[in-house]
Image: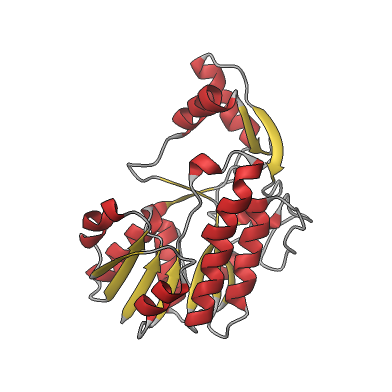
Amino acid sequence: MRYVIIGCGNVGMELARRWTAAGHQVTGTTTTAGRVEELQEVCSDVAVLRGSDRAAVERVSSGADAVVLTVSPRLSRSFDAAQRVAEYADTLTASARTAAEVHPRVVFTSSASVYGAGTGDVVDENTPVTGDSDASPRNFAEAEAAVLATAGGAVVRIPDVYGHPRDMDYPTRVKMAHEMLGGSVPFSADALLYRIDYRDAAAALDFVVSEGLTGIYNAVPDTVPPRTNEEVFGEICAAEGWPPLTFRGEIKTPTVPVSSAKLRAEGFTFAH
């Protein structure tokens, strides 16, 4: 099989590693020429492009069995509401629309933020997406809609990704929030802090592609009840002697449990 991965960050690189090890041909993309050598370690071919560049995406996707989008907005442009507008529109919505226009089988890595704070007792794939105007959930939802409009479209909704050696751990993130943002973050204090290991995120995408699944699937580890942002980050601040964070509540994520029963019913298991 031949696969294209648009946006090879930690999850995309792990997915490429899995597929290459299984004998598949993998074309990985990056927006940074300086990362080509790194991608060549796990990909058959590498292309430097933006996901919104239709001509470039059409060229690398020609003849592929599937295109997987693991694009991620730059963290440095995610904390400010005004900066999120252009960053999320180009990275998420434009990339998804481009891929859906040029290939019939696209799988998009989305976010649990599309649910907003959530409704009811449990959030599942039938829970309506939020109407929140913030650039994060709005662009994830618009990207999803573009992919799901195609016959072979699939969406995998994941929470915060962790576990890769290059990932910033939570104390480092909190320190950065204090040093660069004055201790103010765009998230909600009462949101449940779900996390997924980058290897499980890649495995979920692999599973959806390999099993020929279409539609929406939550890939949110749901067997251990999570704690809230305020609880987790409050403990970090107390341990380090920092003031508590201020949660602005601009990016809302579920405050009620999220279920991944649909994906598990297909046979997927979280390993980490």
Q: Residue at x 57, y 27 (%)?
A: 181
Image position of 251 with respect to 203: above or below: above
Q: Which residue is drawn at 46% across and 69% down?
A: 53
For the residue pair 165 and 197, the one nearer the viewer reads as 165
Q: In which quarter of the image is the N terminus?
A: bottom left
View extreme (top): residue: 241
Percent position of residue 127, x then y: 73, 64
Q: How many marks?
A: 0
Q: Is residue 191 left or right of residue 28?
A: right
Q: Which residue is drawn at 65% across and 43% down?
A: 82
Residue 109 visible in image = yes
Percent position of residue 255, x then y: 71, 46
For the residue pair 153 and 38, the one nearer the viewer reads as 38
Q: Is residue 259 left or right of residue 205?
A: right
Percent position of residue 141, x then y: 65, 63
Q: In which quarter of the image is residue 38?
A: bottom left
Q: Quadrant of residue 203?
A: bottom left
For the residue pair 143 and 83, the one nearer the viewer reads as 83
Q: Which colour scheme is used?
A: secondary structure
Percent position of residue 60, x then y: 35, 76
Residue 222 visible in image = no
Q: Residue at x 38, y 64 (%)?
A: 49
